Amino acid sequence: MFSNIKIILVQASHPGNIGAVMRAMETMGLDELLLVAPKQYNHPDVTSMASNATKVVEKVTVVETLTDALEGSEIVIGTSARFRSISLPKLSARECGTLCLKNKHKNIAILFGSERTGLTNEQLMCCSKQVYIPTSDHYSVLNLAMAVQVICYEIKMASLQEQLNSSINQTVSLAEYQEIHSFYLHLEKVLNKMVFFHSNEPKKLMLKLRRLFNRVNLEKSEINILRGILNYIDKYEH
Ligand code: SAH
């Protein structure tokens, strides 16, 4: 599903973590995993921790260098809990999910460092952005597989949100500028007639009301309801 997104583990040292990363990815629908010079890979802990992550297990690629792993990547993102002195633009895990979804047609690589050292400054400098997972102040470093889980979860959530937004957009017709503008004129006219503005500052109040309605994307049907209410008030004998 997210075939444009590669998860790259740089020099992972625990085979159990590699297996747990496979499971984390498969549960979230990602299956492109690259291992750069893992310390131990042919180890029973990989398969036992991977459990039923069959797609990732079948497709996993092992390469010698980070340069090999990054071949063809257009957006390279590094994950780290530590902020460095020479720093990159930072994104939270959530913002990273959104960025991945916005760049569906680009090849994206997300780098994770080794358990002992994390990503070195040099490895981080292959990236255009640093992603952090927000944590408590006193302990900010997650286990490698858990960090992968959080990042993949945010990608999955961003994609669910996108699906939701597009289904809402398909079923709903939003009111056009003219319709909204006419509604504001109508509202102002009725408020005036009700002498509502008497003790208020009419211009300021209308601006505030416009700002209120502008915050929601008014649908055509909602404008019709509001205009109906205004018509009703307008006809009502005071
Ligand atoms: N000892 C290392 C941490 C290694 S944890 C250090 O001090 O940097 C293994 C990897 O998990 C990290 O390299 C990073 O890729 C990821 N990770 C762990 N915690 C993270 C966090 N809070 N935000 C982003 N990535 C994190």
Image (cartoon, rainbow, N blue to C red):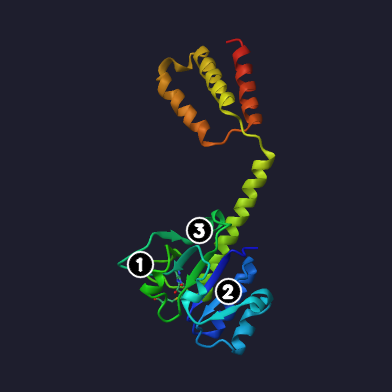
SS state under label 2: strand
Q: Which residue is mark 1?
A: 83
- Amino acid type shown at disc 3: Arg
Q: Residue at x 42, y 62 (%)?
A: 128
Q: Residues within 10 Å of mark 1 (few under 14, many from 20)?
A: few
CA–CA distance in space, label 2 to label 1: 25 Å
Q: Which residue is mark 3?
A: 94
SS state under label 1: loop
Q: Residue at x 64, y 66 (%)?
A: 29
Q: Residues within 10 Å of mark 2 (few under 14, many from 20)?
A: many
- Where is residue 199? Give x, y as percent: 41, 17
Q: Are marks 3 and 1 in contact (CB under 8 Å)?
A: no
Looking at the image, which is closer to me, 126 or 15? Answer: 126
Q: Residue at x 59, y 33 (%)?
A: 218
SS state under label 3: helix
Q: Which residue is mark 2?
A: 33
Quadrant of ligand 1 in image: bottom left
First-in-chain label (2 vs 1): 2
